[in-house]
Amino acid sequence: MTPKSKNILQAFEDYMNANPLPSRTREGASEKTIKGYVHDVNDFLKWWKQTEGEILTVGYLRKDPFALNKKLIQDYVNHLEKKVAISTVLRKVSVLRAFVKFLQATKTIEHEPMHGLRLPRKAEPEPRGLSDKQRSRFEAVFQKPWVDTVTKRKRIKEVEENVIGDAEHRLVRDRAIVFLMLYVGPRVDETFQLNLGDIELKEKSGTLHIRKGKGLRECRTSIPLPARKALHEWIGLRIKLGLEKGKDAPLFAALRGDTIG
């Protein structure tokens, strides 16, 4: 079925499923993202019908491609500014860019109606984060392993040594996890998807490679000294414990007594 013979919204959704977003070069968008894009384009199509008195179709645009022009889209932006937050306006404009790319890719239009739009400016948010005092107090939690010393029966020496040893191993691993997130900023799911090959540690520098971050984007970022120290200690412990090796092995492997991994 060609775009001309199907509903323009369905044609756009099919295109989104088969192609990356304009800002991406790797994988396509997630199902949730596509549904959001389709929802926003549907809102634009409703506004178009109310404003122009016509249903926007591929056939309509092929007969009169310049019906979709900068002035009309600017009117839509102005309409949105009166109703929704600036962040929502900017999101919907981004969706319209993807919609226009779809129309151009399917040869429905050949011009660019998005150039030169006047868009609202989003105020820069105040930076939020831990103060030096708060960070110091937080880091102090990971200076000593927590071991339950209150038991119903006295531990024999061997069992006690094993418990303390396990706690110390988890402390090293968990400190590396927390310091990486605190100083570099990967999300929880990004952190636990990391493999050994995703970090590069040198004497005075380090690099974190996130292969599939927010929006399916790839990124590389430097690792500050506190996080590098914690990671060096953890990787040394991994070797000592004989955990899985190789660049594709999970960076933060499971240890005895927990379910991480």
Image (spheres, rainbow, N blue to C red):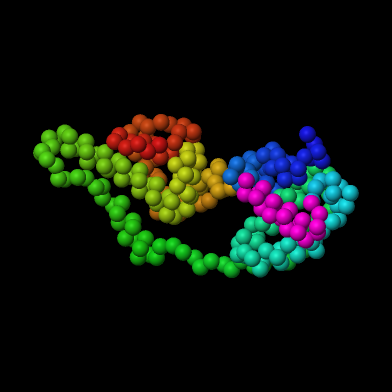
Q: Residue at x 19, y 45 (%)?
A: 148
Quadrant where the C terminus is found in the figure: top left
* Residue 7 percent coordinates (x, y): 76, 43
Q: How many marks?
A: 0
* Residue 64 percent coordinates (x, y): 88, 52
Kindly give the residue lying farthest to the right in the view shown: 63
Q: Residue at x 70, y 65 (%)?
A: 79
The quarter of the displayed image where residue 74 is located: bottom right
Is 45 left or right of 217, judged from the image as shown?
right
Is 254 left or right of 106, judged from the image as shown?
left
Front residue of 42 and 216: 42
Front residue of 148 and 107: 107
Q: Residue at x 43, y 31 (%)?
A: 245
Residue 208 lies within the magenta run: no
* Residue 26 percent coordinates (x, y): 65, 41
- In the depicted structure, whether residue 195 falls above or below residue 202: above
| Boundaries of the magenta span | 35-55
Is 162 left or right of 76, judged from the image as shown?
left
Is residue 186 visible from the viewing direction of this image?
A: yes
- In the depicted structure, whether residue 161 falls above or below residue 214: above
Is residue 104 visible from the viewing direction of this image?
A: no
Front residue of 197 and 75: 75
Front residue of 30 and 131: 30
